[in-house]
DNA sequence: GCTCAAAAAGATAGCGCTACCATTTTCTTG
DNA sequence: CAAGAAAATGGTAGCGCTATCTTTTTGAGC
């Protein structure tokens, strides 16, 4: 273990700090002194280098480098009365959907000055309220919250926070500030209408977790089925249990028990759909001939499954990315004209919901 | 939209802040004044209520509530010279493995006073170094880093940070501080030995992303194959591309081209394994009769697939959880005796690697 | 070369909280 | 009930940085 340490001993002696404190990390003042400028000038170098003359800029830069200066974020936040933190409230880490959203968020924040501070509400609006209060203490520069079902209290806290806020995942009539999402209701109708157009009559609905967005998908299903005069409550099976692939198979079993003549299933997410496919293989149910399957979200594996599985593509990554982009623009005072962005969806038809598997 | 606002106007008049500043949020001093105690006593209430007498405690509590006091974290961090932030450096958000680790981390931090600050190194040790420096500025209470392959510089930064640090995901000879992981080398040997014991001779290795831990799995494969006198470089196919299920199928195709008489595959993760299974279905290759499959990590879907897929179970959730637990104990000065924790692994044998599919 | 505006640099005074130490109050105990 | 120890409380002085305003320097235009 040879640590090659090229450490040019600085031609500079640190003065003892006030009041017999131990020598902590390098402070801005020390950088300024070494550079031969005032502290405030050194401060400006780190926030807006263009404001310095070239000569001072270079002197501060090399002094900071020589001393290995690291700014103290707490002091900065206290003095400037703001932070460069974007708070993100998301209901789950288990649900892969949010994984993609988070990726978009982190990707978009990269290269910007902003730091993501992510918390997990666990699908509880009370937990959300609590975490929102916690964010209050941090004075974030911006906030991303999931969905539109916040408590009155949460809304009050958000409105009092005095920072831009983006609600993501869905759209609603009364944005706190900005929104990026799509209509789960419409997406669901598209999926179910497709199955109806295929000539399926006994189209089941499989739902798990049943968060507000899934509820709206159920509403879409209801609407489409009623409009086609195909609605039958026995075709619906939901549970509040979190989603897994295994659960998909189990739910299919239960649904078949309550609706034996099922000829299609709309699953509220792709994990359930793949679980359903496996269960069909286990039971010898031909897909799509005997049972058509449509999932939701269009995860990567849907295209690769055998048979390939239809799904509703949602723009999860883009949702996270756009939310951060909109937020940063708003923080920096250049809001775009559109505070509500509909990212839409796309029905992807694959083998699992075609006329014949031929 | 009726916002029912029960706002008992406080029988208390805020004095103008110094120097004509606008009236900002409530400060601790104001709470103290309303409670009729000194600011430092009020401060103590929020950090260690037990230190106050019952009467003062109640007075401060109700004053804080009445004024809706929210402490200023930046001021607290600056004055106390520490934060309650645990920094987490993880290489990927795409890889579901880290999803589980993160879940463990967030779950374990919940209820504690610590906040998780997570960043994504994108499998780059240079990016890691940069992010580590960024954390320096924040003075975190503790740090979780992934793996043992840090740059010299990164190690130096970590050592200078003066906070407990846990390295997760794998074990190594020279911990920066603490470690929670398991031996990827041994786990790989277990998987390959199982296939050898099954009588398979032409056992392929499919790898993607090829991060340091995957490299060690490859080493394990090499060792097991060489020890059994079955080693053949043509059986190995790796790519630096990120993992997807679709990639699994493509890689199988390529591997079959370079080693046509393949009778088993060890995939470095479950996504590849499921992709391989789908590809087998597409090509009419019987699993496990013609081709046995073993994956890695034992994601939930492995048990549900048809046929069910063998895998090496790793304790990802526990890794995250234990890392945080160890960190908090160390931060609070009660380290346990074991700074290096081996969480082990377990070979889960399922249909995809049994003698006969019967 | 002089005037005046703009750019660059600096002095001052906190940001809101807690560490540290001093002081006061309360509780023991012979 | 006095003396000493322990618990509770308070005064003072920053933590390291930046907002604000002032002063100095630079540069453009005639």
Image: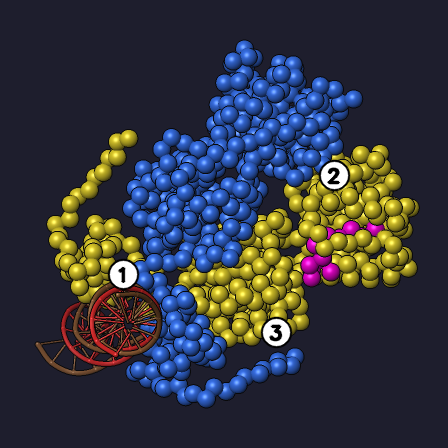
Chain colours: A yellow, B blue, C brown, D red
> Which of the 4 quarters of the picture holds residue A340?
bottom right
Of label 3 and label 2, which has the lower sequence position? 3
Of label 3 and label 1, which has the lower sequence position? 1
Q: Say if residue A142 shows up in the picture.
A: no
Range shown magenta? A204-215
Q: Chain of mark 3?
A: A
Q: Mark 3 vs mark 2: give the one in front.
A: 3
Q: Secondary structure at mark 2?
A: loop
Marks 3 and 2 in Cβ contact (< 8 Å): no
Q: Position of residue B236 (x, y in %)?
A: 55, 21
Q: Above or below — where is B288 with respect to A11?
A: above
Q: Which residue is mark 2?
A: A308
| Extreme residue toward the top, this view | B229
- Left of A71 or right of it: where is A141? right
Q: Mark 3 vs mark 1: give the one in front.
A: 3
**Camera-nearest residue between A102 and A246:** A246
Q: Which residue is mark 1?
A: A45
Q: Which residue is mark 3?
A: A152
Residue drawn at x 74%, y 58% as measured from the top left: A217
Q: Residues within 10 Å of mark 1 (few under 14, many from 20)?
A: some
Q: Above or below — where is B341 with respect to A313?
A: above
C-alpha separation, residue under disc 3 versus residue under disc 2: 44 Å
Marks 1 and 2 in Cβ contact (< 8 Å): no
Q: Position of residue A255 (x, y in %)?
A: 84, 48
Residue drawn at x 48%, y 23% as measured from the top left: B219
**Camera-nearest residue between A22 and B234:** A22
Q: Position of residue A12 (x, y in %)?
A: 13, 52
> Which of the 4 quarters of the picture holds residue A38?
bottom left
Q: Above or below — where is B4 with respect to A293?
A: below
Q: Above or below — where is B91 with respect to B61?
A: above
Of label 1 and label 2, which has the lower sequence position? 1
């Amino acid at each position: 273990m040879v640590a090659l340490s090229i450490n040019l001993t600085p031609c500079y002696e640190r003065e003892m700090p006030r009041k017999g404190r131990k020598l902590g990390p390098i402070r801005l003042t020390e950088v300024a002194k070494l550079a031969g400028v005032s502290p405030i000038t050194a401060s400006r170098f780190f926030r807006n280098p263009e404001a310095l003359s070239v000569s001072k800029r270079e002197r501060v830069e090399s002094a900071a480098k020589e001393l290995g200066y690291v700014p103290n974020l707490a002091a900065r936040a206290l003095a400037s009365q703001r932070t460069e933190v974007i708070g993100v409230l998301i209901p789950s880490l288990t649900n892969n959907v949010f994984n993609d959203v988070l990726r978009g968020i982190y990707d978009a924040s990269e290269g910007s000055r902003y730091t993501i501070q992510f918390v997990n509400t666990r699908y509880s609006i009370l937990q959300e309220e609590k975490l929102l209060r916690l964010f209050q203490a941090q004075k974030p520069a911006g906030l991303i919250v999931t969905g539109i079902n916040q408590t009155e209290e949460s809304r009050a806290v958000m409105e009092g926070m005095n920072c831009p806020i983006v609600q993501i995942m869905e759209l609603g009539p009364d944005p706190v500030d900005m929104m990026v999402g799509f209509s789960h209701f419409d997406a669901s109708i598209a999926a179910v209408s497709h199955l109806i157009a295929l000539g399926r009559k006994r189209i089941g609905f499989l739902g798990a977790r049943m968060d507000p967005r899934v509820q709206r998908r159920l509403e879409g299903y209801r609407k489409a089925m009623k409009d086609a005069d195909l609605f039958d409550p026995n075709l619906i099976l939901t549970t509040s249990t979190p989603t897994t692939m295994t659960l998909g198979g189990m739910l299919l079993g239960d649904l078949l028990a309550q609706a034996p003549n099922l000829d299609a299933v709309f699953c509220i997410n792709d994990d359930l759909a793949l679980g359903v496919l496996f269960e069909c293989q286990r039971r010898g149910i031909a897909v799509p001939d005997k049972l058509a399957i449509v999932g939701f979200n269009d995860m990567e594996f849907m295209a690769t499954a055998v048979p390939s599985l239809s799904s509703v593509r949602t723009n999860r990554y883009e949702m996270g990315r756009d939310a951060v982009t909109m937020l940063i623009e708003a923080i920096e005072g250049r809001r775009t004209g559109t505070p509500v962005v509909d990212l839409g969806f796309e029905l992807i038809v694959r083998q699992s919901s075609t006329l014949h598997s031929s």
